[in-house]
């Protein structure tokens, strides 16, 4: 209740507008892209809180050290050890199969700089759990943020990524100069 009221105040008092095509009706992998600033996190939480979507999100392990750990976990954070990304995918898949994950926010373009491709973990998690992918976005040019369509991935990585690229083609992120094109390093079979 308090979260929803905070989110509504955020959207009504701030310059950003929340635009959502549809709200997921079942557990989903929620992509947060383009991930170009720490403000993306605030915008995505405000979306989830206003729409009353229970979310978990992946964050680098260093965000969970000291006093920040309990705060980050209370906000839905799951610490990620970047040294072993395959283990992270396995742990998230196990959590989803146990019914723990309701909405999992993933930023596939990784950290906010220095990347040329998206990471494939979101795709592997969605395929291994049977969860759809919901396309969340931030677009500075229109000052909008929200949820786009929810897609059922087919396993045809090239075709699925073409749909994802099409949706994000006109989305700039909070800092457009840091935007990474939605492309996996290898858009062949992921398994």
Image: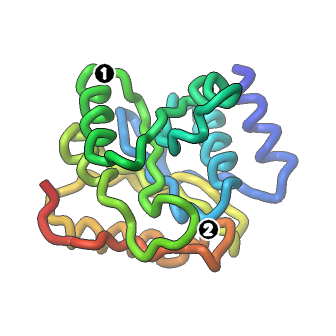
First in sequence: mark 2 vs mark 1: 1
Could you classify mark 1 by the number of other residues whose Cα lies within 10 Å: few (under 14), some (14-19), or many (20 or more)? few
Indicate left or right for 64 with 89 as reference. Answer: right
The residue under label 2 is 173
Indicate left or right for 45 with 77 as reference. Answer: right
| Colour scheme | rainbow
Viewport quadrant of the C terminus:
bottom left
Q: Residue 55 carries which label?
A: none
Residue at the extreme right of the image, as rendered: 13
Residue nearest the observer in this picture, 51 or 85:
85
Give the alpha-carbon distance from disc 2 to disc 1, as whole Å: 32 Å
Indicate left or right for 21 with 185 as reference. Answer: right
Q: For numbered disc 2, what is the local secondary structure?
A: loop
Q: Where is residue 130 in the image (x, y as percent from the top left)?
A: 21, 40
Q: Position of residue 51 (x, y in %)?
A: 59, 36
Q: Position of residue 67 (x, y in %)?
A: 70, 26
The residue under label 1 is 99
Image point (22%, 37%), residue name: 129
Which quadrant of the structure image shows residue 48? Answer: top right
Indicate left or right for 65 with 32 as reference. Answer: right
Viewport quadrant of the N terminus:
top right
Image point (61%, 47%), residue name: 44
Residues at discs 2 and 1 in contact (Cβ within 8 Å): no
Residue nearest the observer in this picture, 184 or 149:
184
Image point (35%, 73%), residue name: 183
Image point (82%, 58%), residue name: 15
Looking at the image, is 18 positioned above or below residue 183? above
Residue nearest the observer in this picture, 138 or 125:
125
Looking at the image, is 99 positioned above or below residue 131? above
């Amino acid at each position: 209740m308090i979260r929803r009221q905070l989110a509504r105040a955020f959207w009504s008092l701030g310059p950003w507008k929340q635009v959502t095509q549809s709200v997921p009706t079942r557990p989903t992998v929620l992509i947060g892209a383009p991930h170009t600033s720490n403000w993306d996190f605030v915008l995505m939480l405000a979306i989830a809180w206003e729409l009353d979507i229970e979310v978990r999100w992946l964050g680098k392990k260093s965000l969970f050290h000291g006093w920040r750990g309990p705060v980050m976990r209370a906000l839905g954070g799951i610490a990620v050890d970047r040294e072993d990304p395959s283990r992270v995918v396995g742990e998230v898949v196990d959590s989803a199969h146990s019914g723990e994950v309701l909405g999992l926010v993933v930023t596939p373009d990784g950290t906010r700089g220095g990347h040329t491709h998206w990471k494939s973990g979101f795709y592997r998690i969605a395929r291994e759990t049977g969860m759809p992918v919901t396309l969340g976005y931030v677009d500075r040019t229109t000052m909008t943020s929200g949820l786009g369509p929810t897609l059922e991935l087919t396993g045809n990585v090239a075709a699925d990524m073409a749909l994802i690229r099409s949706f994000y083609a006109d989305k700039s992120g909070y800092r457009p100069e840091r935007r990474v094109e939605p492309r996996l390093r290898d858009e062949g079979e992921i398994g």
